[in-house]
Amino acid sequence: MIISLMFEPRIQTALKRLYTIFSTLRASEFIKGGYMKLLITGGAGYIGSNYCHNVVEKYPEDRFVCLDALTYAGNYNNIKSLEGKNNFKFVHGDITDRDFIDKLFNEEKFDVVINYS
């Protein structure tokens, strides 16, 4: 796992737990029939973008929507190489904008939300 080389041990442990949780959630694909759709908030930040890079490659059958306001911590260049992938979409927006978030959830019908913001 490339991500393991980038973080100190306590962050590596936390990320491994997230991967474990994600793996157990995959059982829901049998109920839905095909794929899961995940929203990753703060996905252009340091940790969120590393998570996006790993799961987009590891789970090509799932759909990932990266939401980020691109303020001080988010950097579009962190996820730019994922644009054009069939299972990845970037959305520029703020999680504090309730109308925007309501509309996004109604349009996308997310199965899982992972918050890095």
Image (spheres, rainbow, N blue to C red):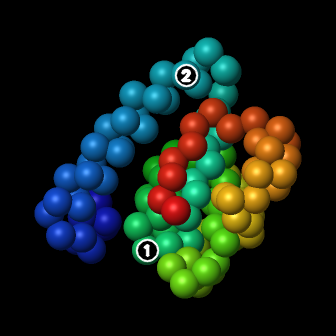
Tell me: residue 94, above or below residue 13.
below
104 sits left or right of 4 in the view: right
Q: Check disc 1 and report its element: helix, strand or loop.
A: helix
Residue 82 image-quadrant placement: bottom right
User: Depth check: 82 or 22 in front?
Assistant: 22
Observer-nearest of 91 and 28: 91
Which residue occupies 64% across, 78% down?
A: 70
Which residue is painted at 62% across and 49% down in the image? Answer: 39
Along the horizontal axis of the image, is 57 left or right of 63? left
Q: Residue 111 location in percent, x, y?
A: 63, 33
Residue drawn 24% across and 61% down? 11
Q: In this view, does 72 lie above or below 84?
A: below
* Tally of numbered tags: 2
Q: Which amino acid does label 1 sit on?
A: Tyr
Q: How far apart are marks 2 and 1 (CA)?
A: 28 Å
**Residue type of the residue flagged with mark 2:** Ser
Q: In the rendered view, does 104 fall on the left or right side of 32?
A: right
What residue is at 48 percent from the left and 59 percent from the top? 116
The residue wearing badge 2 is 28
Q: Position of residue 85 (x, y in %)?
A: 68, 62
Residue under pointer 1: 46
- Specify the farthest residue to the left: 9
Q: In which quarter of the image is the N terminus?
A: bottom left
Q: How crowded is mark 1: few (under 14 residues within 10 Å), some or many (20 or more)?
A: some
* Whole-percent x, y for residue 51 in the image: 44, 60
Q: Image quadrant of residue 17?
A: top left
Marks 2/1 in contact by CB < 8 Å: the verdict is: no
Task: Where is residue 95? Give x, y as percent.
Answer: 67, 58
